[in-house]
Image: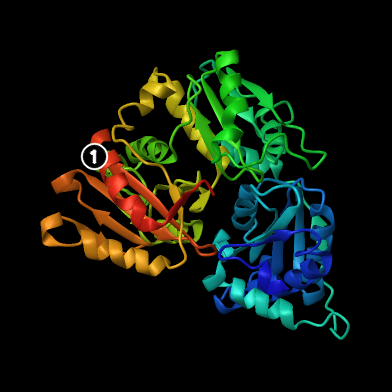
Amino acid sequence: MLGRIFKAYDIRGTYPDLLNDTMAWQIGYGASKFLLSDAQEAGETTPMMRNLVVGRDMRSSSPSLTKQLIQGINDHGGDVIDLGLVDTSMIYFAVNHLDCAGGVMVTASHNPPQYNGFKVSKRKAKPVGEATGLAEIRKHAAMVDKATLVKSNGRVEQRDLWPAYSRHVRSFLDTGGKKLKVVIDASNGMAGTMIPKIFGKGSTMGPVPGLTIVELNFDNTRGVFAHEPNPLVAANLRQVQDAVIAEKADLGVCYDGDADRCMIIDEKGHAVGCDHLTALLAKHFLALAPGASVVYDLRSTKAVAEEITKAGGKPVRSRVGHVFLKQAMADNNGIFGGELSGHFYFRNNFNADSGVISMCVVLSILAKSGKTMSQLIAPIARYPQSGEINFQIEDKDAALNSLKREFIAPAKGATLDELDGITIDCWNKFGWWCNVRKSNTEPLLRLNMEAKDKATLTKILAEISPKLGKRTEH
């Protein structure tokens, strides 16, 4: 059963049929064994390196799963600092702020309410994926026998890190007191707890001068959602888009369930592409660190690399996924990184992603620019894009090989790379490029295409689509 809930980047399943309290105990034991051993092998022997930070989201199953997770950690011998109800990005902060061996967040992120799971981080808040520790945690969890285990006695303490976390987050915010109105849709998730504690009356720093926050779906006490807490789905943005127009707001923000991602809505009610936002934020950070590297999702518009280069930075393409983005940030000493999923990464946030820091930087840029959000984005959104299109097909490899045979020839003027799926680039000769990636779990191919003009995009999309299978809205 454990094998069904361990994914490429986290642990996730429906509760209680696929994921239950017994499994939470096993996972706690396995996570403690892996994380404490990893810290020891790295030569980290400080007293805090026996500590793991644990937090949870607002789902109705989170309290019981958290209780059993902590018990499993303690029974292995790990000590726990329980942060309570927090956003996932606070876990990354806490691991570094307290110098712990790692952390576990109990959350199912953007999934519906019947789901839950665990996001695991090791020391320095480095991500733990299948190849970087989850396989070992799964093995330890599967092998432990609670009935015969000689239990150790780890300790638990509750700690309030909101004051320290608020200071850290607000260090990224500089609006100069300019009056700004922002509509925030918390999606009935952890932003409903986090936003008031950092920016509202509940903050130890007090409200932000000049900033008016209009709250949508902040109630997270019932474990239900007014809409699916996934801001990448257009239907889930309608409420905040309508509210931005009705309130005559400068900006809208929609968070996912655990508030580590957000989508930005401009003053006209239009969603801002995350690659366009990456380019905008890159210019901001390159002004602070001239010549630095900026890491970006390889599915991003060509405008991202162009804007980074124009601003004097070094553009670094990365595979899709937070494990790869964070590694590329570390390898290249990146100042900033962004991907299409709405995750944004910051050197001064331990190379970790943060939805709330992303919002702070956007508000700072907006305040200083003297422009509207749509005016800031318009010059960047200069090339027509297909968006991500899914195609259902059983033999994914055959379809990819067919594409390579047809388009990678001297007469086609194309280049090919296979950093993540296949990227066919005819930009310089014919004005288009595309990336096609395989789904890890489903018979799907995912296409992203861009062209210098709409006519070329329409033409090439019509040529390539039939080769990829049946188009699906999935």
Number of residue marks: 1
Q: Along the horizontal axis of the image, is 413 left or right of 224?
A: left
Q: Along the horizontal axis of the image, is 314 left or right of 269?
A: left
Residue 174 image point, x, y percent: 49, 28
Q: Point out the residue furthest to the right here.
A: 147
- Asked whether 230 or 165 is in front, the reply is 230
Residue visible at 20% across and 62% down in the picture: 408
Residue 75 image point, x, y percent: 82, 74
**Label 1 crowd (10 A; few <14 / some 14-19 / many >=20):** some
Residue position for label 1: 456
Residue 459 image point, x, y percent: 26, 42
Residue visible at 45% across and 46% down in the picture: 340
Identify the element where label 1 is drawn.
Answer: helix
Q: Along the horizontal axis of the image, is 80 left or right of 260?
A: right
Q: Is residue 443 visible?
A: yes
As displayed, is residue 214 above or below residue 128? above
Residue visible at 85% across and 57% down in the picture: 64
User: Hey, what amino acid is under mark 1?
Assistant: Thr
